[in-house]
Image (tube, rainbow, N blue to C red):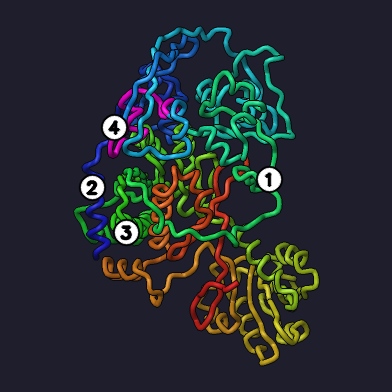
């Protein structure tokens, strides 16, 4: 009942919020109207309408509302650019609560310009009493004729935006501005617009080097932390730096070195952050500056009948998106309360994505994200990718809270470990046991997986499910004698590869009967799926067999003496589920990283591992891409409970 009241209050809250419409207007579709007619009416392109209304690509219906940009971009017109000339400096003594952002806004300059003339700010935060120089610029406008400045370029296989931008001496953002309809991932054969350079002016791409795209507000100090290279070394490798200085989106050539901290490529042998030092961020000095985060979840409040408690409760129960969002946000609320108790100053915007592309696009166009330090969500991969692509140019980090299948672009933090990482952690754990006898049991559907396991454990015995004689189909059972032949005295590790509950029940029952004082049996699997939780499978058998598997989290237990569980139960009169705990853990981690590091990106280096109620986070950066969670749990059944494996 408390959650019902809670969602009704959310309906009221969202009902009072109106979207900013400074950069767009709306159009109500009339009967028989086409996208072409609407584009002509407002002097915009079809692509501009589709960018704001992705659902319109499929169909537009009468009375539906489209978002139309106010400022259309007309091709082939001269562009007006601003040229800044440094005239002098103004001295400023930093006052309480002043930030780089507020000073940049006050004096109408970029934050990077202030840092450039006050190099200490690359290494240290702004403090009350600091005396700094504020650059004063004379701004003039010049007209740049578009004709003859650009040319067409056909994308080659394996070429990405950063590579083409590097070769043509422009930033990734400038390349995107030249090609407003360009997809996030370039396709071979696509024709795009690039600067019209002479052949000798196009830079060669050297495979012996790695390349790094400069992020927003990233200076030479930050680059040294990430790459280990000084400003002088970077300038030798990238002579353009001597004339242009660092620019957001600029692509830099750097030596390939797998040990450089910013170049943690996800390919090659998988390494797992198991031995990293864990950081208790609450014990550090917390930044008193107000941090601004946004949370985007599919509450789907637009579909709720707030006048009927019965209809609302039924909707929450029946709709998985709304249910998961409410559970997740119930944990977020307790995290926000905990952070407030710690003295963290926080501004939080909560958005209902309604699980619709057009709604997400509309929210992103509202300009409400300009000063946001981090965004949690959206949940659904397609909507998350839209948001991350839109906010990438602003270097705003997005954290994927639940799903895994997302585009790992530079500003993305994938908080859920991959299946490959989970499997590798499990295999590494058992490979360290040189004395155990390994057995692999599998059905035909998982034969390929069993074969791969056999390569890892070449001495393992392989036992396949019995088959129906006439058809050769799986019978999903083995016989007692099948196990007698392969079990040995001492420790036996048995991999069971199946998604069939009956087969799991059959195997675990037989193995349970074979446990003796001289025969230890540990059951495990490289794919822990829902079949292992089926009612047909007895938990007592799994517990007796110390069933061990890899997991993204450890299970919350009411027996655990933690304040979160007690506070949650006191507030909602129920035990938190995994989504509620994840909402708490992820929010605590994101905000604590923001108040203990300059930003979320740097926190991945400064706070390599953090642990909370059920989840832990160790972010590692891919060479060309964002950050992925590089740590997992190994857990096992013990005394009918799921506990963390002691290593």
Mark with earlier residue (2, 4): 2
Q: Which of the 4 image quarters holds residue 524?
A: bottom right
Relative placement, left or right, of 621 versus 158 is left
Residue 189 drawn at (x, y percent): 67, 26
Callout in the foreground (2, 3): 3
Location of mark 1 (residue)? 258
Residue 332 percent across, percent down from the top left: 35, 56
Q: Quadrant of residue 98?
A: top left
Q: Find out whether residue 66 is within the magenta segment.
A: no
- Residue sitting at x 27%, y 69%: 570
Q: Which residue was labeled with disc 2?
A: 13
Q: Which residue is mark 4?
A: 20
Rendered residue at 64%/22% (across/down): 239
Image: magenta residue range: 94-114
Task: For residue 569, say whether it is visible.
Answer: yes
Residue topped by disc 3: 338
């Amino acid at each position: 009942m408390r959650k019902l009241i809670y969602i009704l209050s959310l309906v009221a809250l969202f009902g009072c919020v109106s979207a900013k419409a400074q950069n767009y207007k709306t159009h109500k579709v009339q009967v028989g109207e086409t996208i072409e007619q609407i584009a002509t009416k407002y002097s915009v392109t079809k692509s501009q309408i589709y960018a704001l209304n992705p659902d319109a690509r499929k169909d537009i219906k009468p009375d539906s509302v489209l978002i139309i940009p106010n400022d259309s971009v007309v091709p082939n017109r001269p562009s007006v650019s601003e040229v800044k000339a440094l005239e002098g400096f103004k001295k400023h003594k930093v006052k309480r609560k002043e930030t780089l952002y507020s000073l940049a806004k006050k004096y109408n300059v970029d934050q990077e310009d202030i840092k450039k003339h006050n190099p200490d700010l690359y290494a240290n935060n702004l403090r009350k009493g600091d005396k700094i120089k504020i650059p004063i610029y004379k701004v003039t406008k010049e007209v740049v004729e578009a004709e003859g400045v650009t040319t067409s370029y056909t994308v080659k296989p394996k070429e990405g935006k950063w590579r083409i931008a590097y070769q043509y001496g422009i930033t990734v953002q400038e390349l995107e501005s030249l090609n407003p309809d360009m997809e996030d991932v370039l396709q071979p054969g696509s024709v795009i617009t690039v600067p019209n350079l002479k052949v000798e002016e196009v830079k060669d791409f050297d495979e012996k080097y790695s390349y790094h795209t400069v992020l927003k507000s990233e200076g030479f100090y930050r680059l040294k932390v990430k790459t280990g290279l000084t400003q002088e070394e970077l300038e030798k490798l990238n002579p353009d730096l001597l004339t242009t200085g660092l620019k957001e989106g600029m692509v830099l050539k750097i030596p390939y070195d797998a040990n450089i901290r910013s170049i943690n490529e996800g390919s090659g042998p998988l390494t797992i952050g198991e031995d990293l030092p864990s950081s208790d961020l609450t014990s550090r000095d917390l930044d008193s500056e107000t941090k601004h985060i946004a949370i985007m979840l599919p509450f789907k409040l637009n579909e709720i009948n707030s006048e009927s408690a019965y209809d609302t409760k039924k909707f929450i129960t029946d709709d998985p998106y709304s249910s998961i969002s409410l559970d997740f946000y119930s944990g977020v609320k307790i995290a926000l309360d905990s952070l407030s108790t710690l003295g963290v100053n926080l501004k939080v915007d909560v958005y209902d994505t309604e699980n619709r592309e057009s709604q997400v696009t509309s929210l992103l166009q509202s300009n409400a994200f300009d000063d946001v330090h981090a965004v949690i969500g959206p949940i659904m991969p397609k909507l998350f990718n839209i948001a991350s692509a839109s906010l990438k140019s602003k270097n705003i980090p997005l954290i994927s809270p639940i799903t895994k299948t997302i585009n790992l672009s530079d500003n993305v933090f994938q908080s859920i470990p991959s299946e490959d990482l989970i499997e590798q952690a499990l295999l590494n754990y058992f490979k360290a046991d040189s004395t155990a006898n390994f057995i692999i049991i599998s059905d035909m559907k998982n034969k390929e997986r069993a074969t791969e396991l056999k390569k890892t454990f070449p001495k393992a015995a392989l036992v396949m499910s019995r088959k129906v004689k006439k058809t050769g189909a799986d019978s999903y059972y083995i016989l007692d004698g099948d196990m007698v032949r392969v079990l040995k005295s001492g420790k036996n590790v048995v991999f069971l590869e199946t998604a069939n509950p009956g087969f799991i029940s059959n195997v675990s029952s037989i193995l349970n009967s074979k446990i003796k004082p001289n025969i230890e049996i540990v059951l495990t699997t490289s794919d822990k799926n829902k079949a292992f939780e089926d009612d047909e499978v007895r938990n007592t058998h799994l517990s007796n067999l110390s069933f061990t598997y890899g997991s993204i989290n450890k299970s919350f237990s009411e027996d655990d003496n933690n304040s979160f569980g007690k506070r949650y139960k006191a507030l909602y009169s129920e035990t938190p589920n995994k989504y509620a705990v994840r909402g708490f853990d992820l929010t605590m981690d994101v905000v604590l990283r923001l108040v203990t590091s300059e930003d979320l990106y740097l926190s991945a280096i400064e706070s390599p591992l953090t642990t909370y109620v059920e989840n832990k986070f160790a972010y590692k950066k891919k060479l060309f891409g964002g950050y992925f969670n590089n740590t997992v749990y190994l857990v096992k059944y013990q005394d009918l409970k799921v506990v963390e494996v002691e290593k």
